[in-house]
Image (cartoon, rainbow, N blue to C red):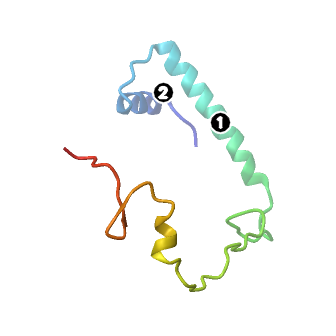
Amino acid sequence: MSITLKDVEHVANLARLELTDTEKAQFTDQLNAILKYAEKLNELDTDHVEPTTHVLPITNVMREDVQKESLPIEKVLRNAPDEEDGHFKVPAVLE
């Protein structure tokens, strides 16, 4: 597969870019160089390589979700700057 001048013009049009003829030729060469480099991957023998989503084994490191007693409301509200009827009281943010 190779990129043609027409492909570059089409992409430039989609991106609403105005390119000079020199820029179009430059981008065509650069994009073809990128594709040529990417084609080197086809030379690799990957027949016996197992597909992975990550190169290292990843395990869940989170603790078990165990239900515990909640703190008493009095202890929780001790750190509140202001409280009302057992709730945190904060400044109004709406007028």
Q: Residue at x 47, y 72 (%)?
A: 74
Residue marked by disc 1: 34
The reply to whether dot 2 and dot 1 touch (C-beta < 8 Å) is no
Label 1 SS: helix
| Gap between marks 2 and 1 measured at Cα | 15 Å
Image spot of residue 90 (x, y percent): 35, 53
Q: Residue at x 80, y 71 (%)?
A: 48
How packed is label 1: few (under 14 Cα within 10 Å), some, or many (20 or more)?
A: few
Label 2 SS: helix
Image spot of residue 86 (x, y percent): 36, 70
Residue marked by disc 2: 5
Q: Quadrant of residue 65?
A: bottom right
**Mark before the other along the chain sequence, 2 or 1:** 2
Image spot of residue 68 (x, y percent): 58, 85
Along the viewing direction, whichever of 26 and 4 lies nearer the viewer: 26
Instruction: Judge left or right: residue 46 versus residue 4.
Output: right
Q: Nearer the observer, disc 2 or disc 1?
A: 1
Q: Amino acid at mark 1?
A: Ile
Instruction: Judge left or right: residue 48 versus residue 89.
Output: right
Q: In the rendered view of the protein, which quadrant contains the C terminus?
A: top left
Along the viewing direction, whichever of 54 and 58 lies nearer the viewer: 58
Q: Quadrant of residue 25?
A: top right
User: Is 20 rendered above or below residue 30?
Assistant: above
